[in-house]
């Protein structure tokens, strides 16, 4: 017993990390180690923050860290380990191991605990502070799943996130008129919503009967995504191909998070059942649940009126008991048909709800600034010149140089034109895919009329050597001359608060929603200026679709979002936090007390560091063996287009269907699709998809193969290179 007491006392006595002179200090005793690093939430889990060894064998390092909860580990001679002097541990994100954890409180104390320095605060009462501005940007994106030859989407994810996220992330704001946010809708996402799910389904949906004319749909040979066909087809007629989409393929009807699955016990039981024992009723329920589980909870719990005058009400099919959902009755094929009609109603309301709430910088009306991304979501600096990665990744082996500035320009130009087609005006802002920026691509945005962009604060730190605070916007321009105030060649850039953005994406999923919202607010208020004349702006930027399905204590993040927007509404009235869009910031909004902030009046950054929102480099998309091979595949095909002298796309080209020029442009479209970041994201060891990486590998190579198929149809004598039939994933 005495030994145990001594151990506990020692753990408290030597517990760490510690907070000293404005820094969090990490220390570990490892006298025989050759190298030691520390990685955690505070440094993006970088493995390259090495510690310094003293003569006694202690390794230490200090970091400037913002208040919050942080997980971390030491890396001792390449071996990951928890902190032996910190008794507090939590399961990691994937629940495969444990991490050490601590909290840096808002009064700058180290707390060895796994819960935040926050509490449930439903009265929304906070200490009085000066005003601070908050710029929230929700990024909504899906890659192009279009197989141009089959004219069908290879994946269901545009639809699943459409009914679960894209509609309600905008519509929820109607309840909170004093909250203004920005929503980024990528062109590849908008194209698939509008051209496939809305236009193609519309002619077959009978809104009065709330059903789809399946017979005519199949007779006409319409293609949308294979899971639409699955729902409209009688389960008794399923083929082996259908069973692949039902449960055998990497992407199937059980491709939902474990958190979502747990909320539908009958669905979970079907996943755990032996497929050889599936009855026709089971098969019908499996495909039905794949749709139902991907509807936002609002649709499951009551009648919802959509902005186009339609309504969705699923309460006759499902009921909620003790936080879980159960079917009210046996599911029929007619129910499956109906759910496709319900899906159409939601999908056809996504663009209208954004238009309804869209902020107009001229009239100063609306809540949502809608922005977009280069068309197919490419890592624009790497498309412009892949060798730019040598700046931030000097020791990584890179592929042969991919250097096509004209492709980078076309990705932005196409996006601006498509946005204008959808919304009737050009976008003022753009979220570069993955926050990827470089000095070279500033001119691409400027020449296309973009007024502001965004990336991560680590890029700011690299650009300015850590001397500039993240809570101000800055100016960047086309030239490399510091101090040149050319307004026409300049744009504004904001840098996201990494910690707060990642807290929503990865940390708050384990919190009570009221506690999470309180933590968010307390964090923002901690940066309120002491001088009332100083204006600070914090930017929170993250995916608005992927985080919510992992919220374990809060169904789809709805409790957190409602609590957050409620608090922000009150604090706006109290004059403490003003949510603002960047259009409001630049041009002002007198109705909300926001003065104009002309671009040229901001501090200039020169030059802008080349990097992304992940580690301020590009190593998620280039540098690993698989990633490099993918770039060389892309380069080979792009060079073939040059050798064949296939004319680059011109402005306003609308060639006749089936002509040579029509197929040439289809070939170019396949090239641009293959330039998207998502394919490279899944290559290498750093990322693995929920259903495996194979579908993304197939999607990437399909786009490249289609380049040659379209060129053949255009009359070019070309063969499809054999290497395109070889999976890049074979390296694993």
Image (tube, rainbow, N blue to C red):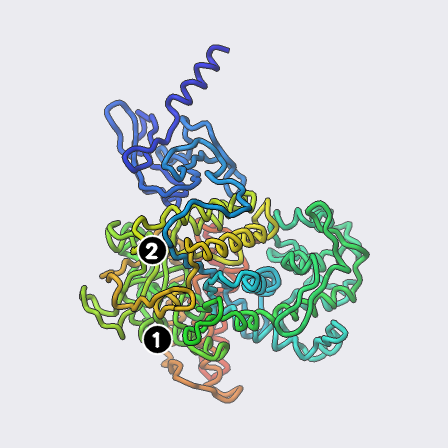
Mark 2 closeness class: few <14, some 14–19, many ≥20 residues within 10 Å:
some
Q: Which residue is mark 1?
A: 449
Query: Of callouts 1 and 2, which one flags the residue occurring earlier in the amino acid sequence?
Result: 1
Q: Is residue 638 visible?
A: yes
**Residue 535 higher or lower than 8, as above or below:** below
> Alpha carbon of mark 1 to alpha carbon of mark 2: how far?
26 Å
- The answer to which quarter of the image holds residue 425 is bottom left
Left/right placement of residue 289 relative to residue 551 reads right
**Residue 606 higher or lower than 498, as above or below:** below
Q: Position of residue 405 (x, y in %)?
A: 32, 71
Residue situated in front as seen by the camera: 527 or 264: 527
**Residue 242 higher or lower than 549, as above or below:** below
Mark 1 closeness class: few <14, some 14–19, many ≥20 residues within 10 Å:
some
Left/right placement of residue 469 relative to residue 694 reads left
Q: Position of residue 132 (x, y in %)?
A: 38, 54
Taking the spot 45% from the left edge, 73% from the top edge, the residue there is 360
Q: Which mark is residue 558?
A: none
Q: Position of residue 11 (x, y in %)?
A: 42, 22
**Residue 375 higher or lower than 507, as above or below:** below
- The answer to which quarter of the image holds residue 50 is top left
Residue situated in front as seen by the camera: 210 or 75: 210
Q: Position of residue 124 (x, y in %)?
A: 51, 48
Q: Is residue 689 visible?
A: no
Q: Secondary structure at mark 2?
A: loop
Residue situated in front as seen by the camera: 417 or 666: 417
Taking the spot 73% from the left edge, 48% from the top edge, the residue there is 321
Q: Which residue is mark 2?
A: 536
């Amino acid at each position: 017993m005495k030994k145990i007491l001594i151990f506990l006392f020692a753990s408290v006595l030597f517990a760490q990390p510690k907070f000293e002179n404005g820094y969090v200090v990490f220390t570990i005793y490892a006298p025989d180690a050759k190298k030691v690093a520390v990685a955690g939430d505070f440094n993006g889990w970088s493995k390259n923050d090495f510690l310094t060894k003293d003569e006694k064998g202690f390794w230490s390092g200090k970091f400037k860290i913002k208040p919050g909860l942080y997980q971390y580990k030491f890396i001792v001679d390449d071996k990951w380990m928890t902190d032996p002097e910190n008794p507090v541990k939590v399961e990691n994100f994937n629940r495969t191991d444990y991490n050490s954890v601590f909290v840096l409180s808002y009064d700058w104390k180290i707390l060895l605990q796994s819960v935040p320095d926050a509490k449930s605060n439903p009265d929304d009462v906070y200490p009085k502070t000066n005003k601070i501005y908050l710029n929230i940007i929700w990024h909504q994106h899906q890659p192009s799943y279009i197989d141009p030859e089959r004219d069908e989407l290879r994946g269901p994810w545009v639809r699943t996130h459409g009914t679960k996220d894209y509609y309600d992330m905008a519509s929820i704001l109607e309840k909170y008129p004093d909250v203004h946010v920005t929503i980024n809708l990528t062109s590849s996402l908008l194209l698939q919503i509008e051209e496939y799910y809305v236009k193609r389904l519309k002619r077959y949906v009978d809104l009065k009967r709330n059903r789809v004319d399946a017979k005519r749909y199949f007779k006409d040979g319409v293609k949308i995504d294979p899971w639409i066909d699955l729902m409209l087809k009688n389960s008794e007629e399923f083929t082996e191909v259908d069973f692949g989409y039902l449960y055998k393929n990497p992407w199937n009807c059980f491709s939902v998070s474990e958190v979502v699955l747990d909320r539908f016990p009958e669905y979970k039981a079907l996943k755990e059942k032996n497929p050889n024992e599936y009855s026709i009723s089971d098969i019908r329920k499996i495909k039905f649940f794949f749709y139902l589980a991907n509807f936002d909870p609002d649709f499951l719990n009551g009648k919802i009126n959509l902005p186009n005058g339609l309504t969705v009400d699923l309460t006759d099919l499902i009921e909620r008991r003790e936080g879980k959902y159960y079917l009210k009755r046996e599911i029929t094929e007619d129910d499956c048909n109906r759910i496709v009609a319900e899906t159409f109603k939601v999908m056809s309301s996504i663009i209208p709800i954004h238009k309804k709430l869209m902020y107009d910088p001229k009239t100063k009306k609306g809540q949502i600034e809608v922005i977009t991304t280069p068309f197919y979501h490419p890592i624009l600096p790497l498309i412009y010149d892949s060798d730019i990665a040598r700046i931030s990744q000097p020791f990584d082996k890179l592929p042969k140089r991919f250097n096509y500035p004209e492709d980078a320009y076309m990705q932005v130009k196409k996006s601006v034109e498509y946005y204008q087609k959808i919304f009737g005006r050009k976008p003022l802002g753009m979220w570069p895919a993955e926050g990827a920026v470089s000095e070279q691509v500033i001119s691409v945005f400027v020449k296309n009329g973009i007024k502001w962009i965004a990336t991560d604060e680590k890029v700011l730190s690299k650009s300015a050597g850590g001397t500039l605070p993240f809570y101000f916007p800055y100016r960047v321009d086309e030239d490399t001359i510091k101090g040149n105030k050319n307004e026409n060649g300049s744009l504004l850039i904001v840098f996201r608060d990494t910690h707060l953005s990642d807290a929503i994406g990865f940390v708050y999923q384990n919190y009570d929603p009221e506690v999470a919202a309180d933590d968010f607010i307390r964090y923002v208020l901690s940066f309120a200026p002491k001088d009332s004349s100083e204006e600070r702006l914090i930017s929170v930027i993250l995916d608005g679709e992927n985080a919510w399905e992992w919220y374990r204590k809060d169904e789809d993040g709805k409790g957190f979002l409602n609590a957050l927007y409620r608090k922000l509404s009150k604090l706006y009235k109290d004059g403490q936090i003003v949510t603002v869009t960047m259009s409001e910031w630049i041009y002002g909004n007198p109705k909300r007390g926001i003065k104009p902030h002309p671009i040229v009046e901001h501090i200039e950054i020169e030059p802008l560091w080349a990097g992304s929102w992940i580690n301020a480099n590009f190593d998620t998309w280039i540098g690993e063996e698989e990633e490099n091979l993918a770039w060389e595949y892309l380069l080979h095909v792009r060079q073939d287009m040059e050798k064949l002298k296939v004319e680059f796309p011109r402005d306003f080209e609308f060639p006749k269907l089936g002509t040579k020029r029509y197929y040439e442009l289809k070939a170019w479209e396949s090239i641009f699709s293959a330039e998207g970041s998502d394919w490279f994201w899944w290559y290498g060891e750093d990322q693995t998809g929920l259903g495996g990486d194979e579908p993304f590998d197939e999607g990437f190579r399909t786009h490249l193969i289609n380049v040659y198929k379209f060129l053949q149809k255009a009359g070019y004598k070309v063969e499809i290179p054999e290497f395109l039939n070889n999976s890049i994933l074979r390296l694993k």
